[in-house]
Amino acid sequence: MNRRLALGPELQRGAQVTVTVDGRPVVAHAGETVAAVLIAEGSPATRLTKSGAPRGVFCGMGVCFDCLVVVDGIPNTRACMTWVRDGMAVSHQDVLAAAGSRPAKETDAA
């Protein structure tokens, strides 16, 4: 699903890039934020709270920290403040990750 505005004389897009969202390749454009891509793809909820409530873009300017996602393995990344780039891996985040933490990898010792 693509919810981007239709192109017209007053709207131009940056170069096309490919990012993955939860393992699925998605077309994005240079100059878009991760939040814009998620909204355009019909996935406005970026994370779940501890109680399971969805959160997403609220302020759109980096103040509220509601739009947190995992970008290239880094949790707690603000989707509204992060520009997409070719090859970026984005995933929805479950709960707020502790400061300094990183997601576990399959190669980590159990």
Image (cartoon, helix red, strand yellow):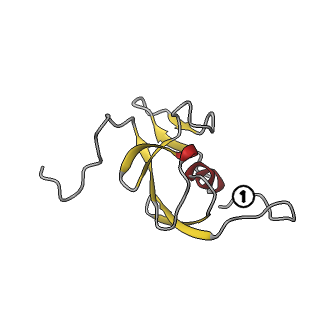
- Residue 8: horizontal and vertical position, in percent? 85, 64
Q: Residue at x 45, y 37 (%)?
A: 48
In the depicted structure, whether residue 34 falls above or below residue 64: below
Position of 26 relative to 77 (above/below): below
In the image shown, does 78 or 69 lie closer to the viewer? 78
**Residue depicted at 38% across the width and 45% down the height:** 75
Q: How many marks on residues?
A: 1
In the rendered image, the quadrant that contains the N terminus is: bottom right
Asked where in the image residue 49 lies, by quadrant, the reply is: top left
Left or right for 101, reference 83: left
Position of residue 26 relative to residue 47, above or below, is: below
Task: Mark 1: give few (<14), some (14-19) or many (20+) Cα within 10 Å.
Answer: few
Q: Residue at x 43, y 63 (%)?
A: 23
Amino acid found under the numbered disc labelled 1: Arg
Spot the residue most to the right: 9
Residue picked out by circle 1: 4
Residue found 61% across the figure and 34% down from its top: 58
Relative to residue 66, is residue 36 drawn left or right? Answer: right
Q: Which of the 4 quarters of the picture holds residue 30?
A: bottom right
**Kind of element beneath mark 1:** loop
Instruction: Where is residue 98? Give x, y as percent.
Output: 31, 34
